[in-house]
Amino acid sequence: MSKLSLDRILQSQGFGSRKYCRALIEDGDVAVNGAICTDYKTPIETEGLVLTVFDEEWTYREHLYIALYKPAGFECSRKPSHHPGVLTLLPEQFEWRAVQPVGRLDHDTTGLLLLSDDGAFIHAQSSPKRHVPKVYQATTAEPVTQALVDQLLAGVQLVDEPAPLAAVSCVQRGEHQLEIVLEQGKYHQVKRMLAAAGNHCAALHRSQIGGLTLDSLAIGEGEWCYLEKPQLELLVPD
């Protein structure tokens, strides 16, 4: 348990500078567990804290762990260059908190994307040493063949990679559909592996990271949700 002054709490939750947060408090725009508080110096217990700012409730969270159903046409970058950034799909407060994507999905790839402001979590989830499996549904330009599946399972050589990369599993789901499981997380890996195996990726969707599935989160395309402890535990490899 810890106590912080109310202005520090608001700042930590992404509501702006200390000066702006103090003004919000003094103007009566902030309630603590349902009661208006106008003294920004008031020490507040953070555990179980629910803030109301401009009549909207916010539960205090030391760190943010978020799952987003990424739509096509968005870049996984805090400084996008050619398309809108995924942070535009989240509340403004999250950008103030320096939330960033955990890894990347291409702008035209859809599916499960993790975001956080916890540097240790981002580093751990991004580390290739963790071997966290990720499940993708790939739509191919040319029909899927058994030879293609066999190649992806055996491993294909990509430019600038010292050794061939192989799928953990690869299952045909339709004439132009593959379900591919990878652990490495290399740049454009699914697309490059399909190209190296003689086909091309027409569309790509990530449905699962570790044991966390997009279906279990019950969010639609472009929507997000907080990840709680039981869901975060699903991201730890067996």
Image: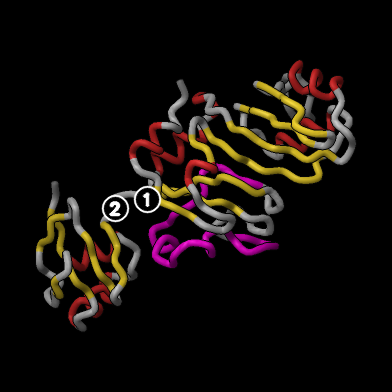
Q: Residues in magenta?
A: 80-105
Q: Are marks 2 and 1 in contact (CB under 8 Å)?
A: yes
Q: Is disc 1 placed on a helix, strand or loop?
A: loop
- C-alpha gap between disc 2 and disc 1: 6 Å
Residue 61 got which mark?
Answer: 2
Rendered residue at 54%/65% (across/down): 88
Q: Which amino acid does label 1 sit on?
A: Leu
* Between 135 and 41, the one nearer to me in the picture: 135
Query: Is residue 81 found inside the magenta-colored segment of the image?
Result: yes
- Residue 156 falls left or right of residue 52: right
The x and y percentages for residue 231 are 40, 38
Q: Is disc 2 placed on a helix, strand or loop?
A: loop
Q: What residue type is labelled 2?
A: Arg
* Between 162 and 234, the one nearer to me in the picture: 234
Residue 64 got which mark?
Answer: 1
* Between 105 and 72, the one nearer to me in the picture: 72
- Residue 230 falls left or right of residue 52: right
